[in-house]
Image: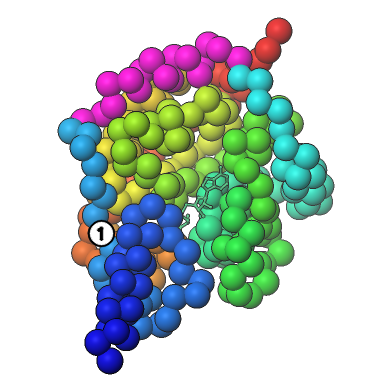
Amino acid sequence: MRRRCRRRALSFRAAVHETATGPRMACRPAVFESLMHANSRTIATQQRGPHEDLARRVSRALNAPWRKPVAAHTQAAFDNAQAWLRERDRPLILDSGCGVGLSTRRLAAQFPEHAVIGVDRSAERLAREYGAPPDNALLVRADLVDFWRLALRAGWQPARHYLLYPNPYPKASHLKMRWHGHPVFPALAGLGGEFEARSNWRLYLEELALALAQATGREARLESFAPSEEGLTPFERKYHASGQTLWRLTVTLAHRPQLLPTPP
Ligand SMILES: C[S@@+](CC[C@H](N)C(=O)[O-])C[C@H]1O[C@@H](n2cnc3c(N)ncnc32)[C@H](O)[C@@H]1O
């Protein structure tokens, strides 16, 4: 009996830990899932303010062409998405890092005159059973690092772009893994549209706002907000149920493909 309790405690600790870094909830027992929903840890970081290397990294991304080749599987996924979008012939909404795609489905219902594309690299998350997406929604398995660059090159101009609860990478040494510290950041900024990012970590969005101002000259609005009971995404619901403050960054971005430097 004692051993079973210890196993449960260990497994619960593992579940909670994973929520801070990017969870895999598929095979968690229901009891742990419900506990996890109410006990998500707040972000722990040693950073006291925006990362001191942020401006330098953004400047480098804006000025040094990045030569990483596009993976064949993302090229194929993008080509499919492009064909799907042409058939729809509607304004585009991107849901980048859509996870299980609940937000993609909800956005498609909220904006029936738009075509909503949710992109995530996790096949396992995309495969979770939430029913077939509606006709104006598409879920794509792809790496955003390649997908955003392809979208920019193809002239995509999303009317709206959502980045909902991106992985925080809270260690200071992981700045380059946050989207605003990554070499692909100019592609994200250059796609344009009504951009909205949400997080339970205010500092992530503060940095994102600084990076966007540096790259585009646009000032983003940053505010706390109270989501609906069910939340727009599973992460939103989980953090809200745990009593965490949720933050939202919004800004209107111009379409500026030239922000991403191209190799000569
Ligand atoms: C913390 S989860 C949030 C998922 C969802 N937006 C939500 O709020 O429930 C971050 C998501 O970003 C995805 N992701 C991270 N890096 C990615 C990349 N390079 N390309 C595509 N998806 C990525 C992960 O697979 C994960 O599903």
Q: Is residue 30 above or below residue 40?
A: below
Q: In the rendered view, does 216 fall on the left or right side of 209?
A: right
- In the rendering, at what x and y percent does residue 165 appear? 41, 51
The residue positioned farthest toward the top in the image shown: 264
Q: In the rendered view, does 224 fall on the left or right side of 96?
A: left
Q: Which one is in front, 93 or 142?
A: 142
Query: Which residue is depicted at the point 44% across and 50% down?
Result: 164
Q: Which residues are magenta?
A: 49-65
Q: Which one is in front, 196 or 260?
A: 260
Q: How many marks?
A: 1
Figure quadrant of residue 177:
top left
Query: Which residue is depicted at the point 43% across and 43% down?
Result: 196
Q: Which residue is mark 1?
A: 41
Quarter of the image where the N terminus is located = bottom left
Q: In the rendered view, does 165 fall on the left or right side of 260?
A: left
Query: Which residue is depicted at the point 71% across and 7% down?
Result: 264
Query: Which residue is depicted at the point 66% across and 47% down?
Result: 142
The residue positioned farthest toward the front in the image shown: 3
Residue 52 magenta-highlighted: yes
Figure quadrant of residue 156:
top right
The answer to whether residue 254 is seen in the rendering is no
The answer to whether residue 31 is seen in the rendering is yes
- In the rendering, at what x and y percent does residue 173 appear? 34, 31
Q: Which one is in front, 169 or 235?
A: 169
Q: In the rendered view, does 228 fall on the left or right side of 25?
A: left
